[in-house]
Image (tube, coloured by chain):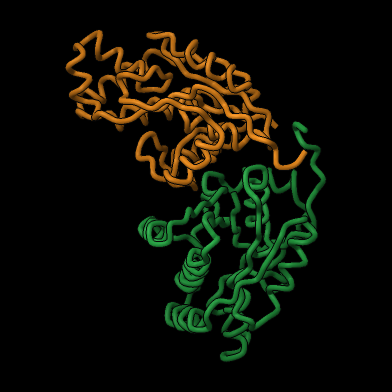
Chain colours: A orange, B green
Amino acid sequence: MRVSVLFSGGKDSSLAAILLEPFFDIELVTCSFSLLPVGDIARETAERMGFAHRVVQLERSVLEKAYGMVITDGFPKNAINHIHSAAVEKLATEENVSFIADGIRRDDRVPVLDMSRIRSIEDKYDVHYVSPLKGYGRAAVNELVSRHLVIEEDQSDNIIKADYETELRELIRQRDGSEKINEVFPAHIQSHVIERKKVRPKRS
Amino acid sequence: MRVSVLFSGGKDSSLAAILLEPFFDIELVTCSFSLLPVGDIARETAERMGFAHRVVQLERSVLEKAYGMVITDGFPKNAINHIHSAAVEKLATEENVSFIADGIRRDDRVPVLDMSRIRSIEDKYDVHYVSPLKGYGRAAVNELVSRHLVIEEDQSDNIIKADYETELRELIRQRDGSEKINEVFPAHIQSHVIERKKVRPKRS
């Protein structure tokens, strides 16, 4: 059984893959609009962790719509959710994909898919969408991350990452300048995985 | 790292334990009011799966309050949630318990703890409450169950189980007769785990 895990190179999507690994064949998938080499950045992280990895191109129209949303709203929530939803649906249309996973945690407010959207994608494309961290709070996730991963954390503009935000920020920078980014994206801490810790398996 | 998994002998709590097993030392915990030998039934199932198991006695007052709720409401949701909440809190008060888990799925409506109750228990007792199946829909759970467990499923009154409902039904039977049970508990399918399938580990 294979699962395609939406992968940003951050701690949450990495931990999601680690929790699924004993039960599925893992492929990490990074979505890109080819505005920045986010696929390459994510591939390097995936390789260091020992996971298979591929890049999926999303339609430019998805990014354009997200751009319009964040500029209109003045905050990124709906824009990020729009890209996430498009990414899940893109994977769902692929013939060999039956399990799609992401790194959404219990306390996350964005990205998050609402239940009717999830059920609609699952039914339409006959796939399972799973969020292995959905039942874990922030502290529990951090506890598991500290056992399994070496990470760096910093303000979002200092961290090289391959999440949806990265290319959306870049588009805003190109069109409206760096100041606009700070206006619509609240400052927050991002993580990037450096490497995976060697954890002695509990049973051989 | 040890996790205490609230265990009914059904497929969901069993699968939750299986998903946690590569990352935690598992102990299954069955809560009982000693009205029926639910602890013994659960222990037998736990032993067949190869997990450590213990029984925790809950205060009779918890069952009495739940009884009052189901009789007043005419449906069991609030009563079951009350018992579940008491069970999580009981475990949280134990000195050596730091991770508490249950088998709640994405689509479950009962039992389910609301987020403020979860955070309150986590903060007050410095524990992590996790629901490994919270990000899995019914079909995804069934897919994983079919790979890992042999189960029997039947109407709730035909299945011997060790969930909160079992003893609550028994108390209603003793006080109000069997007819009353059917009045307040909608008929639904319950599962009981027969055994765990041998699954070849992905990596040794």
Q: How many marks on residues?
A: 0
Q: Residue at x 56, y 57 (%)?
A: B102
State the image quarter where residue A82 is shown: top left
Q: Is residue B3 above or below residue A173?
A: below
Indicate the position of residue A109 as horizontal and vertical percent values: 35, 40
Indicate the position of residue B7 as horizontal and vertical percent values: 64, 62
Q: Residue furthest bottom?
A: B175
Indicate the position of residue B49 as horizontal and vertical percent values: 77, 56
Q: Is residue A79 above or below residue B61?
A: above
Q: Residue at x 40, y 37 (%)?
A: A112
Closest to the observer, B7 or B155:
B7
Task: Classify the position of the C terminus of chain B by image quarter.
Answer: top right
Asked whether, in this view, residue A59 is left or right of residue A186, the answer is: right
Asked whether, in this view, residue B146 is left or right of residue A150, the answer is: right
Q: Is residue B36 above or below residue A169?
A: below
Closest to the observer, B187 or A30:
A30
State the image quarter where residue B201 is shown: top right
Indicate the position of residue A59 as horizontal and vertical percent values: 42, 14
Asked whether, in this view, residue A35 is left or right of residue B132, the answer is: left
Closest to the observer, A166 or B136:
A166
